[in-house]
Image (cartoon, grey):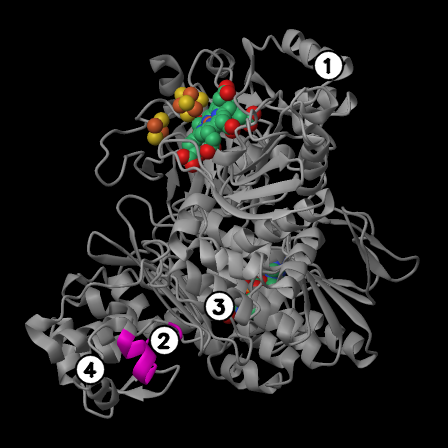
Amino acid sequence: MIGDWIDIGALAEIPLRGARTVPVVGGEEIAIFRTGDNAVFALVNRCPHKQGPLSQGIVHGHSVTCPLHNWKIALATGEAQGEDKGCTPTIPVKVDAGRVLIARMALLTTALAA
Amino acid sequence: MDTIADDFPDMHLEGREHLVVIGNGMAGCRAVEELLERDPGRYAVTIIGAESLVNYNRIMLSPVLAGEKTFDQIVINDHAWYEGNNIRLITGDPVVGIDREARVVRSESGVEATYDKLLIATGSDPFIIPVPGKDLPGVITFRDMRDVEHMLDAAGRGGDAVVIGGGLLGLEAAHGLSLRGMKVTVIHLMGTLMERQLDEAAGWLLKSELERRGQTILTEANTAEIVGDTHVEGVRLKDGTLIPASLVVMAVGIRPNTKIAAAAGLAVGRGIMVDDHMVTSDPDILAVGECVEHDGQVYGLVAPLWDMCRALADGLVEQHSGYRGSVTSTKLKVSGIDVFSAGDFSGGDGAEDIVMRDAARGIYKRVVVKDDRIVGAVLYGDTADGNWYFDMLRKGEDVSEIREKLIFGQAFALGGGNDDPHAMVAAMGDDAEICGCNGVSKAKVVQSIVGGAVSLDAVRSTCKASASCGSCTSIVESLLSLTLGADYGGDLTIKTLCKCTTYGHEEVRREIVAQGMRAIPEVMQTLHWSTPDGCSSCRPALNYYLLCALPGEYVDDQQSRFVNERMHANIQKDGTYSVVPRMWGGLTNPRELRAIADVVEKFNAPMVKVTGGQRLDIFGIRKEDLPAVWADLNAAGMVSGHAYGKSLRTVKTCVGSDWCRFGTQDSTGLGVRIEQMTWGSWMPHKFKIAVSGCPRNCAEATIKDFGIVCVDSGYELHVGGNGGIKVRATDFLCKVATEAEAMHYCAAFTQLYREEAHYLERTAPWIERVGLQYIKDRIVDDQPLRDALAERFLYSQKFCQDDPWAARVAGAEREQHAHLGEFRPLEILAAE
Ligand code: SRM
Ligand SMILES: Cc1cc2nc3c(=O)[nH]c(=O)nc-3n(C[C@H](O)[C@H](O)[C@H](O)COP(=O)(O)OP(=O)(O)OC[C@H]3O[C@@H](n4cnc5c(N)ncnc54)[C@H](O)[C@@H]3O)c2cc1C
Ligand code: SF4
Ligand code: FES
């Protein structure tokens, strides 16, 4: 049976201050971030500026700096910080017993919206 | 088995409802205490415990192990308490079954107790990682007094101990064992100790302190098996390392003990499900402590138990108050190490970090504020204000009024009662110490300002205030503006490395070398970074500075590298990568060309082009395919071209004396040899070299970082050239007679640039900043220095000339290329 949360892998498999990607067949790729203090966030892997792959940016604090033109995106809200304006969709995610779980509904919505 | 009040039920207890408690631990007994406090005559109580001891304070087992307390000192309720309250106590006899229909519990030895209300307080079981050898004698957990006795026994025989798990429990076990004379190694799966309570910065401080005390701490270490024939002899890690041990303590986590509850058919999730009154799915059965799950949460600390027990007792005497979950805080009980963590410092929406570091005193404090309220705190080294923060956190107090001063602690924040930082500085006494590092008082700072030190720099150089760690910079600036009034422009003359620090590039580089720093968190701590883990500007800079200072020793932090250097390829606007294999001096051959052609076809690369740097660039490769592309190129003998790096890029050459009618020297051969000497080297910025065979300069050597123009009588060396937005032609450095000298000067110049330029500063702006004469003084006129620089360059190259592509092909950093998983939404929908 599939509950409200879907297991996508072990927390330990995401590098500290890094990200891993999860492609969605028929939808947009998702980036799962792990920060220096072990918080986990999931965002659509697309910068609000020009679609840069956020998963490849440098993670610092609870932000990621986009690898293409250095926009700084808040991981919790997906919002660009500072002067820049734009927002990337976020997806609820949580960690339980070392496993990373992603919200099923939000995932489906993200997939269908694309 | 040991039973007191055997003549139970006493006459005077008759007519009372019977409460049976399973578990004689912290929560079970506390619940009974709370109940007695409210209505001592209400229930006749029986407590059945698996341990053969009276109720003791489990958290104090650590001090018992460390020899700081005896068992008697940690008893919470002795026999007299049970007797005095007419509690029937059965110890050393676990309950094995609950018959809900008959309302009877049965113990292992066959004792039966009938209940009106049943309370389950069975705590948790330590989690045992399922590796071979886990059942060997000598492998134990850390949960009860018996475990402590085992450890003391083993410690008495001395030798090596391994603790698996670097969380609170594991570290306390390790501390105790090492005080008892064992040689202790801690194996931790994650990169940071106590990663659930601490952030990276605090975890790093903790690790260094434990190592200083003689423990070996292995992070990111995965246990493969426990070895030994009849008794444990060691632990083998997944990477093959074998650590000898006569004792292995597993402290990797706990699982709520729900066995008997589940067997009795109660609703059980991760723990026994309870409502706000600690009632399970059976209205006559309650549960409390670590064995329960409330509102999706299970707990592993005592504070929530107290809240639960209050709610439970209220409910049992029909004054329902209800339990609403708990916020927890943690302190590590290792003497001399103060660590405090509370709430959620993983921030989230709009959360803001306030960080203070004091390297001299080994202090790191981080308070996370969100919507004007404290949501989390991590303190290392000075935990005096932990409870103050925790209290405000729990009450959800608005801290906007004291925000500026919050991080300095309660005394400071509430002391002045004045919000203006200037006024606070003005109010400080003349003998108040401003700069802790150099012991400079306020009077002294003011004196030197009055005496003419009218800038921060001048203050630093006259009285030394703010000259060391910089954490008092803002106070010194306040004093400058208070003393000078309108005359103080406040213009900071130092350009800081980034917003996370008050230090400039040069100071950071100098301090790294002077203080022998070895890791990014160490630099951030020592130099008082104002953020927990830096930003995308300072992290790559620090990574480079350390790499440059500690060749062969520093372990590169991949996550502090820009994407191109992390992926060893150039990211393109569509997220794919371009791949440029190295072609020494711009030369190639049929084998290489064939391999490139094959890769282009095999991976459907949409474009291949000749670059401005005389190489071939293959475009449109997906990150997943990079290792396979590299494998094919490696097979043809090609290595990474570093077209992506702040590193040596290309050595461009022209045809030279072998073919060209004007050629004066073998410019192609020299270019190849220089590229073989310099390839793989990491630099402050990209670095380009060219060798032209005659002054016609077809290789454009005079707009390169290091250019050689061959002439009949030798080699003219040029430095500091740049194409790009702002073109700068090179400066002439000197002329040398031999190829060997040309290479030697090249190595020396490169190393000077590597050691002294700011990160992301190319040679052109660097030379403009320091002046050509500065370079000449060192490279041309000072032979011993030139030799030393060249030698240091060649030494550091020993560790850089491994092809990073080959390492990835062999499986290194697999996670940089592979997806974590994949979703097929249609299948998820179909599975419903
Ligand atoms: C591929 C190439 C263009 C080409 O197809 O010819 C190229 C491509 C890029 N150049 Fe370049 N440069 C290329 C030769 C040059 C040259 C000519 C040379 O090396 O002789 C110059 C002028 C010489 C110089 O560097 O001074 C040059 C000056 C720049 C600059 C300006 C540098 C400066 O200090 O002003 C940048 C921007 C930067 O680095 O910040 C740049 C940046 C870039 C980047 C890395 C832009 C980026 O960040 O994505 C381009 C990467 C594309 C890719 O994915 O490969 N590229 N670029 C050339 C690769 C050379 C090689 O084989 O490694
Ligand atoms: C070494 C150590 C240090 C700790 N330090 C801290 C700390 O610093 N701060 C903090 O907040 N927390 C700390 N803890 C955690 C804290 O001790 C627990 O949160 C607390 O003890 C939980 O109380 P409990 O009553 O739920 O479980 P326990 O105290 O474990 O009590 C459960 C009891 O039930 C018994 N039992 C189990 N099954 C049965 C059965 N079938 N029949 C009869 N009896 C049974 C067990 O033997 C046990 O005696 C520490 C724990 C340990 C082991
Ligand atoms: S000149 Fe501009 S567009 Fe062309 S490769 Fe260089 S950076 Fe890219
Ligand atoms: S695409 Fe992210 S900053 Fe431009």
Question: Which residue was labeled with disc 1?
Answer: B595
Question: Which residue was labeled with disc 3?
Answer: B511
**Sequence-wise first label, 2 or 3:** 2
**Sequence-wise first label, 1 or 2:** 2
Which chain does the numbered disc 4 sit on? B
Q: Closer to the camera: disc 4 or disc 1?
A: 4
Report the disc number at residue B452: 4
Please report the residue visible at 77 percent of the width from the left and 25 percent of the height from the top: B637
Q: In the picture shown, does residue B452 fall above or below A8?
A: below
In the rendered structure, which amino acid carries the disc numbered 2? Ala
- Furthest residue toward right: B229
Which chain does the numbered disc 1 sit on? B
**Sequence-wise first label, 3 or 4:** 4
Q: In the picture shown, does residue A62 fall above or below B405?
A: above
- Could you tell whether B392 is left or right of B730 in the image? left
In the rendered structure, which amino acid carries the disc numbered 1? Ala
Residue B468 inside the magenta-drawn segment? yes
- Specify the quadrant that holds the N terminus of chain B: bottom right
**Sequence-wise first label, 3 or 1:** 3
